[in-house]
Amino acid sequence: MIENKPKLVVIGNGMAGISTVEQILKLTTQFEITVFGSEPHPNYNRIMLSYVLEGSKTIDDIVLNDWQWYADNGITLHTGTKVVQIDESHKEVVTEEGIRVPYDKVIIATGSNSFILPIPGSNKQGVIGFRDIADCNQMLEAAKTYKKAAVIGGGLLGLEAAKGLVQLGMDVTVVHLMEDLMERQLDHQAALMLRTELERQGIKFKMQAQTVELLGGERVSGLRFADDTVLDADFVVMAVGIKPNVEVAKNSGIEVNRGIVVNDYMQTSMKDVYSVGECNEHRGVCYGLVAPLFEQGMVLAKHICGVETAAYEGSIVSTKLKISGVDVFSTGEFIDGPEHTVIANKDDWKRTYKKILLKEGVMVGAVLYGDITDSAELQKLIKQKAAMTDELYNTLMGSGCCGGGGAKKAASVEAMADDEIVCGCNGVTKGNIVDAVTNQGLTTVDEIKACTGATRSCGGCKPVVEQILQYVLGDGFKTAAKQGICGCTTLSRDEIVAEIKAKGLQTTKEVMHVLGWSQQEGCSKCRPALNYYLGMIYPDTHEDEKESRFVNERMNANIQKDGTYTVVPRMYGGVTTPEDLKKIADVSLKYDVKVVKVTGGQRLDLIGVKKEDLPKVWEELDMPSGYAYAKSLRTVKTCVGSQFCRFGTQDSMSMGALLERKFERIDYPAKFKMAVNGCPRNCAEACTKDIGIVGNDGGWEIFIGGNGGIKARLADSLCKVKTDEELIEVCGAVIQYYRETGNYLERTSEWVERIGLEQIKAVVVDNVDNRQALVERVEFALKQVEEPWSKMLNDHDSCSKMFHSVEMKG
Amino acid sequence: MGAQQKTMYHVGTLELFMKQIGRVVELNGEEIAVFRDSGDRLYAVENRSPHPKGGPLAEGIVSGQYLYDPLYDWKIDLATGLVQAPDTGQVKMYSVKVEDGSVWIGP
């Protein structure tokens, strides 16, 4: 049966050939496919070689189709085999060894070769191109033995090679013929910025230098330039360009210009012979980048399978420099001429540059440096020949504040055609992504990556993939996001709190039952949250549910990865006494505490206490709990203040201790940290606290919403007060307002941004009645609490059940 | 499995265990985490998280027959010992039964 299948021979086992085969396989299995590759590898991602050189990927990482893939698809693969000729009269391809393989159709996808300058010495040892895995390995090897490298060519490939060699520890000079780096992709301005950055990264440059000879004996030892100056180098990478690999076509009598000449359907001058990728020349253009090859491959695949297709009309190419930490992008026409309208924005502070070129009001090209988040958007607009509008201008260039282009971006994803390629590295179209999301229910970019390969390589398309994901999920995505506080319910925090109040629900069990939880007894996310909301709503009557507390809050200690705990006794305001220190020392010794650590909040942490020892440790310390484990007031950090410090204007230690005593032990939505400073020198770092207080000569200034953790945020100034009473009152009101409106686990840094500083000011500062009411409510809640360690010690039954194991004699 | 035939050891009364709060039972040097669900059903598993980093299980949050492990929040089916997706693994199970208010545990 197989013999009856038409035979498709693909010459070239690179990205162009194999992506075309992949496209064909999507359409039909009618062909018996044979692939010839000259390299001894399966298809790999050539554009990722820079990352291999840089050390951030391995060769295995960049393999696109492993051996198994060929087997799975019934493809006969000949690696390390060169095809030299297509014999039209016998309809056979001929390999170097003289083996003849019959064909019905042939695809030539031989790519391109490094262009080696025809100058004396270019055949010396230590002179290579940068094109394939073999080159890459040679560079890795060379770096071990040789010190000085020269890279001839300051284009994309040359710079990537140079960066890789610097990374490998070589002293690298890039020799470039032109005035600007990457002059085929960047304008003068962006090129200058790029050069400055790369110099910072350790690459040296010799610009406007024409290499006329490579010096040395058997091995290269240096370069001689047109002005007769010399540069020492024991390793030379030629990256001056590529030339289409047209050998097989030439030998076979196929029409060749610079590349193999093809029409809009990738057909060559020989019947049944196609050519795709860098080896061909379409409408006078030879492309050296990856995106066109996918676009050509798609047209070719459809044509060869007899599926109707639009003609290939050429590609607008974009480039992205693949050097970590250097973001450069350009697309379309990027050098401005008199016919262009130029929109440009250069920011020397942020080191960014953005330029968009218009021709008769239509966007034709762009250059981005430093910040390339708009690259995908620009690429698409330019491809669509979009006319510039005020609206677009605001989206792209910013209207001065907050951007706010989200909705428009979503709309433009919608306008994108299904067969438009989103991921240029892996040839994934918008349609592929939409299908994957809809058919397989994907919800994250990572899932899309695993499923389609999009974003798998350079990652440049990630913003668009995200936009497509959002666009496909659309309202579903929004309802999913609105879908309540966890997977057990569709209700939001506000809805739940409202229902609890309206229906008078008293326990987490009741809430989950009445409000129709999908998992009857909830999960580790909603149970602690409900327990908090109930306690906040009914401070006097809610019975705290230990079984709905996270381990730390249930045990009143912080669990460590080995199952031991830490104990932090209270030291109000970070002030202790010799007596307390002695006690801490004695207990630490007696219970074999592994480490005694001073915490970031000015407390002492006894680390490594066994679970069963916790009650005894608490009892013998005979100090209140420091709440280091709780969604509650952790610490009030203080500076020395006016008692001792010559700069102090306020008594920060006393005020800190007072506030800590006053507002400890009630539950907060999340952990809560405060600081009190005696003067604006701010030694206790008020700016990173939930409430930060800074003393001055005439009173206090209150800051809220600071955070020094995962998402650092400087606190906002809420107000200034004159008296201590006022200070305590405002703190109490802020705390209660946060308790009443905060989402469980939401820190004040997020809460302030969500609620808005102005709103908080209005409620706790400006509206005095409201402030009083909040203070009353927080005072009421504060009256209900008890010191947790002594409470546990007094509850012998729970204490033994929670802290002691049952020992059995087997 | 076929564990019913093995020796069972008497632990004590059901009252030793709080509802939805785990407790460790030590048997021949092994730590067994015992959980009593809201319907008084008991589960006994090795007190060691199947997470690669290990750690205890007894202090997790119990919901129905599921446990959310206290250190890494993995969801574990206490009836089968199986870790729920997206994580994978299985906790070692022990047989446990309640008879006339007495709890028995066996390997």
Image (tube, coloured by chain):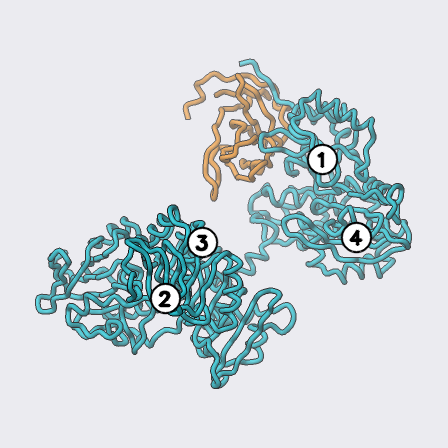
Chain colours: A cyan, B orange
Which amino acid is tagged 1? Val
Pick whichever, A726 or A173, lies toward us: A173
Callouts 4 and 1 close, C-beta under 8 Å: no
Q: CA distance from mark 4 to mark 1?
A: 29 Å
Task: Name the residue that disc number 4 marks.
Answer: A734
- Mark found first going from the N terminus, 1 or 2: 2
Which amino acid is tagged 2? Thr
Direction from residue B17 to residue A731 in the image, left or right: right
Task: Determine the secondary structure under disc 1.
Answer: strand
Q: Nearer the viewer, mark 4 or mark 2?
A: 2
Task: Determine the secondary structure under disc 2.
Answer: strand
Callouts 3 and 4 close, C-beta under 8 Å: no
Direction from residue A11 to residue B42 in the image, left or right: right
Direction from residue A799 to residue A371 in the image, left or right: left
Task: Name the residue that disc number 2 marks.
Answer: A211
Mark 1 residue crowding within 10 angstroms, few (<14) / some (14–19) / many (20+):
few
Mark 2 residue crowding within 10 angstroms, few (<14) / some (14–19) / many (20+):
many
Task: Name the residue that disc number 3 marks.
Answer: A171
Where residue A591 appears, x then y in whole percent?
69, 22
Task: Determine the secondary structure under disc 4.
Answer: helix
Q: Nearer the viewer, mark 1 or mark 3?
A: 3
- Mark found first going from the N terminus, 2 or 3: 3
Task: Name the residue that disc number 1 marks.
Answer: A598
Pick whichever, A311 or A371, lies toward us: A371
Pick whichever, A176 or A645, lies toward us: A176
Q: Is residue A448 visible?
A: no
